[in-house]
């Protein structure tokens, strides 16, 4: 169980030296207990106290790392029930399923298709992360061969799905270097699966018939020394499965029940009658509260909306997505190319830059820091005023790059044109279109 603020305080040096950024050790203890401070902020905690405090400062849901290297992915580590309370940290991981009786050539072709399911949005590369290799016939050699093939030839991390410890052990020998998730330890095989996970330092999923069964398994496995666990309550009835997710999150966060303080794994295809329903159910579990969603297949029409939903759910709601203030050349602009200015809201930048690119008119795009607000909001909030924009144009260095003196401002900020002109004497301020969709036509007309 997590320690209370007073229990933590008793373990601190009590010198009130303030080096942690708060005035007293008691205040630091309270912040640590509520997850608002990091233990490392106090340089004077003894090793003994550190060991005891580690539990108190750990996230109530343990972060579990799958895979190794640049493609390793973390699930869990969440600290709130609702994203508006703070943020969700580690995006739900998506897996596609491959059956262990598949031919190697078919797997190769499938991995090629799945690997191409990558999408660029607001500066992020969105893609599924996992392949779940499912044992369908108990053939350990075939399972191990495919696990090795996937591990060695693809960037995907692996979930090894079999309740037969011998099958898992054979596969781990060839793909253990990629730190696959072993799925799953059950009441019947928990000792053998626990040993494999322990010996090879692998994350291990537990599967039971209900939450009580899960607690029995996680208690046993943590007693064996395993820390990186993932939970499957075994429920395949939709309403109960959702209730399980909420109950686990609530018990971990509100009751600090460490027995369920692990990320979860769900299988929407086992609750759905068709692919459309599977996608809908998967979407539900992205918001509440699956750590890993295993899909029957990865197809554009299913994974793309799920990746976008995930991007939205796991974006920090208290911090607008922004791009850095500065000059962005688009399409090799010259000293005669148009100069446009807009705000640093990431979505605004990507939409406007995309439209400029599509217009094939090389341009200079000036991005002004407006605290991540869109043009109209920034103007209304006084973050994109004429004086500010004019001063920014002067200091950003664009005047050294062009020999003309025309600046295009967004249509939604037409009201600032006069003030910009005052700040930039001799410049022509042109009001661009309100909608970025009209930008291409606007730019083409200007260069004709
Ligand atoms: Fe207390 Fe440590 Fe903070 Fe100093 S740095 S006030 S010793 S908690």
Image (cartoon, rainbow, N blue to C red):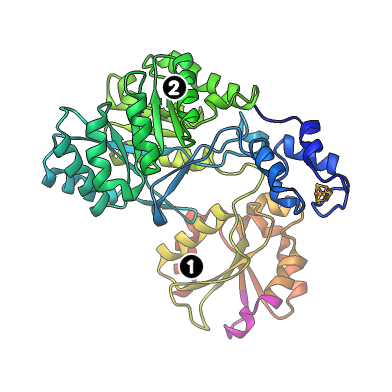
Q: Nearer the viewer, residue 8 or 304?
A: 8
- Residue sitting at x 39%, y 32%: 293
Please report the residue visible at 61 percent of the width from the left and 37 percent of the height from the top.
Answer: 59
- Residue 118 location, x and y as percent? 35, 51
Q: Name the residue carrying label 2.
A: 217
Horizontal relation, residue 231 to residue 136: left or right:
right
Along the line of sight, the residue nearer the viewer: 426 or 205: 205
**Residue 171: image location, x then y, percent:** 24, 41
Task: Tell me which residue sits at (60%, 32%) in the image.
Answer: 60
Query: Which residue has dot 1 on it?
Result: 443
Between 229 and 311, the residue placed more toward the observer is 229
How crowded is the residue under tag 1: few (<14 C-alpha within 10 Å), some, or many (20+)?
many
Answer with left or right where residue 132 lies relative to residue 320. Answer: left
Instruction: Report whether the residue tagged 2 is closer than 8 Å to ligand 1.
Output: no
Q: What residue span does the magenta drawing correspond to?
A: 395-406
Question: Percent position (x, y) of residue 145?
Answer: 17, 44
Is 400 part of what is drawn in magenta? yes
Q: Quadrant of residue 161?
A: top left
Q: Is residue 57 magenta?
A: no
How packed mark 2 is, by other alpha carbons closer than 10 Å (few <14, some 14-19, many 20 or more), is many
């Amino acid at each position: 169980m997590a320690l209370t603020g007073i229990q933590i305080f008793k373990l601190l040096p009590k010198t009130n030296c303030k080096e942690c950024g708060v005035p007293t050790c008691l205040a630091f203890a309270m912040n640590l207990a509520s997850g608002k401070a990091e233990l490392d902020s106090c340089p004077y905690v003894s090793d003994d106290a550190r060991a005891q405090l580690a539990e108190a400062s750990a996230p109530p849901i343990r972060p579990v790392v799958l895979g190794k290297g640049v493609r390793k992915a973390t699930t869990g580590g969440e600290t709130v029930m609702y994203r508006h309370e703070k943020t969700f940290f580690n995006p739900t991981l998506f897996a596609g399923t491959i059956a262990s009786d598949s031919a190697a050539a078919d797997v190769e072709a499938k991995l090629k298709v799945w690997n191409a399911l990558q999408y660029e949005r607001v500066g992020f590369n969105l893609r599924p992360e996992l392949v779940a290799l499912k044992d369908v016939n108990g053939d350990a050699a075939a399972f191990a061969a495919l696990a090795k093939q996937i591990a060695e030839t693809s960037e995907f991390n692996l979930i090894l799905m079999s309740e037969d410890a011998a099958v898992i052990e054979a596969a781990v020998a060839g793909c253990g270097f990629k730190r696959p998730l072993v799925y799953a330890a059950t009441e019947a095989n928990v000792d053998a699966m626990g040993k494999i996970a322990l010996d090879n330092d692998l994350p291990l999923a537990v599967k039971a018939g209900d939450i009580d069964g899960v607690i029995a398994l996680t208690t046993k496995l943590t007693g064996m020394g395993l820390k990186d666990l993932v939970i499957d309550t075994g429920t395949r009835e939709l309403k109960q499965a959702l209730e399980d997710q909420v109950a686990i999150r609530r018990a971990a966060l509100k009751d600090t029940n460490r027995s369920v303080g692990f990320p979860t794994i769900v299988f929407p295809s086992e609750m759905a009658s068709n692919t459309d329903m599977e996608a809908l159910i998967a979407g539900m579990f992205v918001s509440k509260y699956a750590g890993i969603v295993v899909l029957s297949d990865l197809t554009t029409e299913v994974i793309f909306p799920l990746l976008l939903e995930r991007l939205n759910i796991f974006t920090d709601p208290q911090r607008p997505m922004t791009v850095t203030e500065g000059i962005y050349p688009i399409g090799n602009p010259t000293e005669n190319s148009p100069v446009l200015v807009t705000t640093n809201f990431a979505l605004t930048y990507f939409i406007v830059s995309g439209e400029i690119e599509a217009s094939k008119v090389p341009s200079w795009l000036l991005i002004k820091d407006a605290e991540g607000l869109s043009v109209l909001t920034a103007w209304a909030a006084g973050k994109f005023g004429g004086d500010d924009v004019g001063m920014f144009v002067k200091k950003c260095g664009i005047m050294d790059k062009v020999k003309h003196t025309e600046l295009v401002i967004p249509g939604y900020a037409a009201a600032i044109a006069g003030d910009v002109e005052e700040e930039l004497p001799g410049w022509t301020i042109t009001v661009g279109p309100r909608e970025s969709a009209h930008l291409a036509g606007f730019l083409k007309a200007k260069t004709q």
